[in-house]
Image: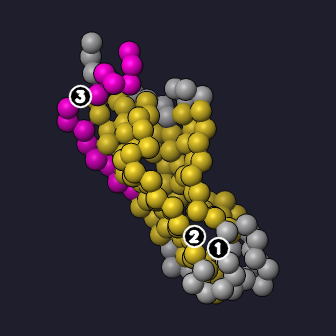
Amino acid sequence: MGYQDFFDREGKSIAFGWWSQGIAPTGQVERISYTVPAGKAALISIRSASIMCITPATTRAFAASWHRDQLVSSGLREILAAQGPGNNAGDNAQIAIGVAGPIRAGDEVVALTVDLSTGGTCAFQVGLEVLEFDRKIT
């Protein structure tokens, strides 16, 4: 069975979003998680990630908002990231993509944030929308 023939005609839109208003540095934190349920398939219709420096860090280090996919149906792992804003208030990085493709039962999409800097604050945003479908019975 190919990707082109396992969707029914009535997809259900499921949207997830998380954002912050300037939080202190923290290790990697999972903000959104979606796993395609058994008997379902899904299309990732849009995803976004952004990060903005609110107050400068004493020492700027790796900081990012990103999506990580673990596609158990194919063994692939994909990453989409907005990372590394400058250390001036208002410096930012962002990325968004539409219609990333089909995912199958058991596949997982996770959105995360991280800031390994010393001091300062960043604002983060991650968003995801999927269209979930029943598997077509053939």
Q: Earlier in the sequence, mark 2 or mark 3?
A: 3
Q: Which mark is residue 20?
A: none
Q: Quadrant of the C terminus?
A: top left
Q: Are marks 2 and 3 in contact (CB under 8 Å)?
A: no
Q: Quadrant of the N terminus?
A: top left
Q: Which mark is residue 93?
A: 2
Label 3 SS = loop
Residue 31 falls left or right of residue 88: left
Residue 137 in view (yes/no): yes
* 10 in the magenta segment: yes
Q: Position of residue 79 (x, y in %)?
A: 60, 48
Residue 77 falls left or right of residue 95: right
- Nearest to viewer (mark 2 / mark 3): 2
* 125 in the magenta segment: no
Range drawn in magenta: 1-16
Q: Are marks 3 and 1 in contact (CB under 8 Å)?
A: no
Residue where numbered disc 1 is placed: 85
Compared to residue 121, the image places residue 107 above or below, namely above
Few, some or many residues within 10 Å of mark 3 (<14, 14–19, 20+): some
Q: Which mark is residue 8?
A: 3
